[in-house]
Image (cartoon, rainbow, N blue to C red):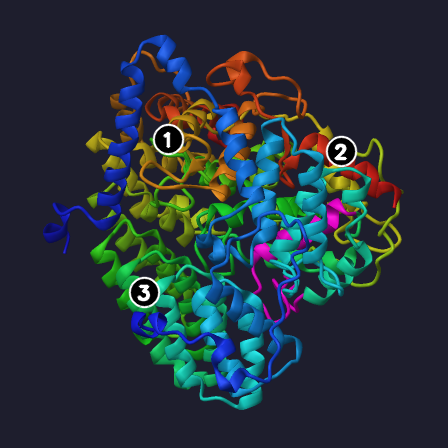
């Protein structure tokens, strides 16, 4: 077998070489240019992007019918991209966006893909993140949180995971979108959290990354969703973090961009999914250290038997453990206890806040400059971003290329969102985007506003 | 539906069987954002869909309408969900449903709704559906051997309906076609660990290690078998560091002096877990180091420095690994 196949390139190799040749053609062209032309090529084309984005908010071509059940997603991709670029939409568009998303909100809670559609967890996440990105009283108060909570509870599945919608599929995406909105809206409690950790844990694969369902292949999108979920429910210490780190750093390829899975092609959107995983890991050093100490000492793996109790939703809305209790402290505390219980609640609402308040203890483990180079030189086009050279731009890739670029630019900032040094930014300093909260992927300032708003209600 | 049929589509408003239905417009409001410039036939189909959906009319004509609407946008989960209710109410022949799904999947096989619906149908059909489902996914893999949804579906079929008998052979065949196909490696791991016919991971370990090491020696730049090899010893580091097949495979690649990054990385992990390297490893590493590498007395540190140099994309990672080496590795 070996001798007959050794000389023939496989499909994977052929496709990989084709992409590499296109990417390096671009890089070679770039390095052949004089310095002033290089600077121009490295610019984030802000005006063109804003124009492309705003146009989509106002009108979409007939070919967009395939996304007719994803309109809150289109809103989020566009609004978040605009916010990352440090701009905002005018009052009229803002008003129209709030009004439109209200029409996607189902009377029984949650948001559907368009007016009159069944509520769906992914479009609920997109709608909530859109409204948080818009910010302001009218936008944030348009979310019916009580109804949303009952929708989330209805979607809870016996496995501990969540269904995407009534009669829908159960996967890691559903877990993340449910937990993310519940966390940011201050409606996360034990009933929602119960056994989610077990489900996510069952999806971490032998490769180190996380799959969409138990048994499937480790994948960048699901790894982000799974890791972020585990952090938000305070159970991240149950994952095998060193194998996860090893897996994710190897997803960055010679092109500088990330691939989604082992031996797959680079794609600009993984700049966020995998880059975001790296950003989250930078704030988990102490837990990684603890895990390696445990394994050194040959102790029992901490992933066993950390069940969450079914009993209570008392921590809902409680402010008891907030303040100076850091995320890491909470985690240690949690581990000592072995389980959540009603008498000693974890304040889920503040996990996202404390996570970002902690200084990043680690330097980036990925190659930030190489990734910025891929996003700007290979994914960026006139107005918008794309998967890779040869592909068309779209709003999804625009959102996640920009999100990934932001992650890169702030990857050396110890304090979340603090002004990076010029050497952290590829291209002119005017390329600097707004910082994001990596657990939710909303602009940091908008996260703070939402957290403040929902802590009062 | 074929293009001929599409060209001669009669608007629903002119079909007598729909004359009693009042279409319901989409409530987009006066100034929607992200408005889509719907083509007339799409807008009309959806208007009639909304009418039967709101009336909860689970009838043959509703079923037919959902087919039309799904062809226009297979991503509309509300339509799929309503279709399931109709299929149940009508006690419809679900074998026909599989054909319908295949038709839709031909246009777009990377869509959550199609696969979720297929799983729902197959679950209802039970073991009858098993071989058809295995064939269906094979057909998809013929076009795209890494289709994520199709792999999930296939794993579900195996676990829920059975059909494990030929699965290891199938993985083998896919890996012979493309040894870099990580989805096939993942499936192989799934079969080896989950198949009720093979006796489990420990029973399969020795032969699987041999298989992976062979694949590594043939193509050391292929990350998949390296990760697979680690997976075979998941939760049993003791056996892993003591398996001579692993260390000698590593050594062989290191001595070849090409494509040795994964071998270095594995050696580092072995050392971190207490592997005691013989002189041959030190010789192999020394042969790879140049003057620019820091002359560390400990092998693990030297390996980190070497990786920092030969794998610049991950130099931050290797620096971090060097800083955090466990006591037993230094």
Q: Count residues near mark 2 (Cα–Cα under 10 Å), then give few for <14, some for 14-19, many for 20+.
A: some
Q: Is residue B140 above or below residue B239?
A: below
Number of the front mark, 1 or 3 = 1
Q: Mark 1 vs mark 3: same chain?
A: no
Residue A179 among magenta residues: yes
Q: Is residue B305 above or below residue B10?
A: above
- Subunit under mark 3: B
What is the CA distance from the residue labelled 2 to the residue labelled 3? 46 Å
Q: Nearer the viewer, residue A23 or A223?
A: A23
Q: Is residue A363 above or below residue B146?
A: above
Identify the residue under disc 3: B140
Q: How far across and how far down the image is residue A204, in percent? A: 52, 52
The quarter of the displayed image where residue B220 is located: top left
Range covered by the magenta-colored residues: A156-185
Q: Disc 1 on helix, strand or loop?
A: helix
Q: How far across and how far down the image is residue A36, in percent? A: 38, 9
Identify the residue under disc 1: A378
Q: Mark 2 vs mark 3: same chain?
A: no
Q: Nearer the viewer, residue A33 or B12?
A: B12
- Kindly check if marks 1 and 2 are in contact, taking CB atoms under 8 A apart as contact: no
- Kindly check if marks 2 and 3 are in contact, taking CB atoms under 8 A apart as contact: no
- Rendered residue at 62%/58% (across/down): A114
Identify the residue under disc 2: A448
- Rendered residue at 69%/55% (across/down): A306
């Amino acid at each position: 077998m070996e001798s007959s196949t050794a000389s023939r390139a496989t499909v994977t190799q052929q496709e990989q070489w084709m992409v590499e040749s296109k990417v390096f053609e671009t890089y070679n062209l770039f390095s052949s240019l004089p310095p002033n032309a290089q600077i121009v090529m490295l610019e984030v084309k802000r005006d063109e992007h804003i124009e492309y984005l705003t146009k989509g908010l106002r009108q979409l071509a007939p070919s967009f019918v395939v996304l007719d059940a994803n309109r809150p997603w289109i809103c989020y991709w566009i609004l978040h991209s605009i916010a990352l670029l440090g701009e905002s939409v005018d009052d009229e568009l803002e008003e129209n966006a709030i009004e439109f998303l209200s029409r996607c909100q189902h009377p029984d809670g949650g948001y559907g893909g368009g007016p009159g559609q069944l509520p769906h967890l992914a479009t609920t996440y997109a709608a909530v993140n859109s409204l948080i990105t818009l910010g302001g009283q009218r936008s944030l108060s348009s979310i019916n949180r009580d109804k949303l909570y009952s929708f989330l509870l209805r979607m809870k599945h016996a496995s501990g995971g969540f269904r995407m919608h009534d009669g829908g599929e159960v996967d890691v995406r559903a877990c993340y979108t449910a937990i993310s909105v519940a966390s940011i809206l201050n409606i996360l409690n034990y009933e929602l959290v119960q056994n989610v950790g077990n489900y996510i844990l069952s999806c971490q694969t032998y490769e180190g990354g996380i799959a969409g369902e138990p048994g499937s292949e480790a994948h960048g999108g699901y790894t982000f969703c799974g890791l972020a979920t585990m952090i938000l429910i305070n159970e991240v210490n149950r994952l095998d973090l060193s194998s996860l780190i090893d897996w994710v750093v190897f997803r960055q390829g010679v092109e500088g961009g990330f691939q989604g899975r082992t031996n797959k092609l680079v794609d600009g959107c993984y700049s966020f999914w995998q880059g975001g995983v790296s950003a989250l890991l930078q704030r988990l050093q102490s837990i990684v250290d603890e895990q390696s100490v445990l394994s050194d000492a040959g102790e029992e793996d901490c992933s066993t038997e950390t069940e969450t109790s079914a009993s209570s939703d008392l921590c809902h809305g409680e402010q008891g453990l907030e303040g100076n209790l850091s995320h890491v402290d909470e985690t240690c505390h949690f581990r000592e206890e072995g389980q959540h219980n009603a008498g000693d609640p974890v304040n889920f609402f503040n996990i996202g806040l404390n996570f970002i308040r902690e200084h990043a203890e680690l330097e980036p483990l990925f190659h930030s400059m190489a990734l910025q180079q891929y996003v700007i030189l290979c994914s960026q086009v006139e107005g918008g971003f794309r998967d890779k050279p040869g592909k068309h731009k779209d709003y999804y890739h625009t959102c996640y290329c920009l999100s990934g670029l932001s992650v890169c630019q702030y990857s050396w900032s110890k304090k979340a969102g603090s002004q990076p040094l010029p050497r952290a930014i590829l291209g002119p300093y005017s390329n600097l985007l707004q910082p994001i909260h990596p657990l939710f992927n909303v602009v940091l300032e908008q996260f703070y506003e939402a957290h403040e708003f929902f802590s009062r209600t | 539906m074929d293009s001929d049929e599409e060209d001669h589509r009669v608007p629903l408003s002119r079909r007598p069987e729909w004359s009693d239905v009042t279409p319901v417009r989409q409530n987009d409001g006066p100034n929607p954002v992200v408005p889509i410039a719907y083509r007339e036939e799409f807008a009309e189909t959806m208007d009639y869909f909304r009418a039967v959906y709101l009336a909860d009319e689970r009838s043959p004509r509703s079923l037919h309408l959902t087919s039309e609407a799904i062809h226009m946008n297979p991503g509309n989960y509300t339509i799929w969900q309503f279709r399931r209710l109709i299929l149940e109410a009508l006690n419809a022949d679900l074998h026909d449903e599989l054909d319908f799904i295949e038709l839709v999947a031909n246009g777009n096989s990377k869509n959550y709704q199609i696969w979720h619906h297929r799983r729902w149908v197959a679950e209802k059909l039970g073991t009858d559906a098993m071989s058809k489902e295995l064939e269906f996914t094979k057909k998809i893999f013929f076009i795209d051997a890494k289709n994520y949804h199709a792999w999930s579906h296939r794993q579900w079929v195996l676990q829920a309906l059975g059909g494990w008998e030929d699965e290891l052979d199938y993985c083998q065949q896919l890996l012979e076609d493309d040894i870099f196909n990580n989805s096939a490696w993942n499936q192989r791991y799934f079969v080896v660990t989950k198949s009720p016919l093979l006796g489990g991971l420990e029973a399969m370990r020795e032969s699987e290690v041999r298989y992976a090491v062979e694949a590594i020696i043939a193509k050391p730049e292929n990350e998949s078998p390296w990760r697979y090899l680690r997976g075979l010893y998941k939760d049993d580091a003791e056996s892993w560091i003591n398996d001579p097949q692993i260390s000698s495979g590593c050594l062989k690649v290191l001595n070849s002096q090409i494509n040795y990054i994964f071998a270095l990385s594995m050696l580092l992990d072995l050392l971190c877990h207490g592997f005691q390297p013989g002189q041959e490893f030190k010789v192999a590493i020394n042969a790879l180091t140049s003057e620019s590498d820091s002359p560390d007395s400990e092998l693990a540190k030297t390996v980190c420095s070497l990786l920092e140099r030969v794998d610049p994309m991950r130099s931050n990672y290797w620096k971090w690994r060097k800083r955090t080496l466990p006591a037993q590795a230094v």
